[in-house]
Amino acid sequence: MERKHKIHDIEKSSLKYKICISGAAESNHCAANALQMSEELGREIVRQNGVVVTGATSGIPYWAAKGAKEEGGISIGLSPAASEVSHVKTYKLPIDYFDLIIYTGFDYSGRNLLLTRASDAVITVCGRMGTLNEFTIAFEDQKPQGVLLGSGGTADHIQDIVDKMHRGAGKIVYDTDPKKLVQKVIKLIEKDKLVKIKK
């Protein structure tokens, strides 16, 4: 007999939260400690029973994946490439520090959409235009988000951008401390989940 899935199953779910780290692949303009903070975010997500999801690229996302794996956690990458060969040879992206990489074949903009939609929340660290693209996709989707303040780049402009766009505050939390930020993001995911269950 087919089992019907009930709201109770969702409420009691033991699935790990998938938290995307979005940030600059090239980090020269980021804060001096941005890579270390990204690595600590990866570690902290694992410590708080989450899975790290990134765009399978270098820079900020790479260090988050590194932190997750060194903490003994799970790291998932979504690549803009259509294959492992293309990922490495054409896009020149890394394959270490991942448990699996999903090859989307949708280039960067298409990858960004899948990346944010596949995640329960998005955390922005430093960043450039692609990071802003991921942020705005998640904002439009009303996805829970965190912003690591003091990391430089896009992250340090988001509050101002949100204020000036006149679309509300969104589901966004801010902090300068990786551990506190992950705690806030998880609370936001859980609150968002409860609201959706009760609808």
Image (tube, grey):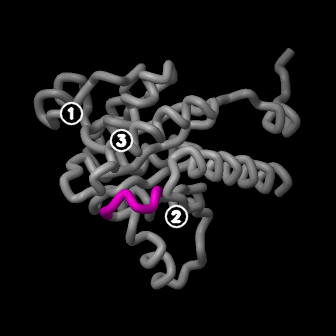
Q: Does 85 sit above or below residue 25?
A: above
Q: Which residue is mark 2?
A: 139
Quarter of the rendering containing residue 152: bottom left
Quarter of the rendering containing residue 114: top left
Please state the horizontal and vertical placement of residue 84, each as a whole percent of the image: 24, 23
Specify start and end residues of the magenta stretch as a single range.
Answer: 148-153
Q: Does 99 sit above or below residue 114?
A: above
Q: Is residue 95 magenta?
A: no
Crowd rating for badge 3 (residues with CA inside 10 Å; few <14, some 14–19, many 20+): some
The amino acid marked with disc number 2 is Phe
How far is mark 1 from mark 2, CA to CA?
Answer: 27 Å
Q: Residue at x 47, y 48 (%)?
A: 116
Please state the horizontal and vertical placement of residue 193, each as a whole percent of the image: 74, 49
Left/right of residue 114 with respect to residue 107 in the rendered view = right
Element class at badge 2: helix
- Labelled disc at residue 36: 3
Q: Is residue 149 magenta?
A: yes
Element class at badge 1: loop
Q: Residue at x 59, y 30 (%)?
A: 47
How far is mark 3 from mark 2, CA to CA?
Answer: 26 Å
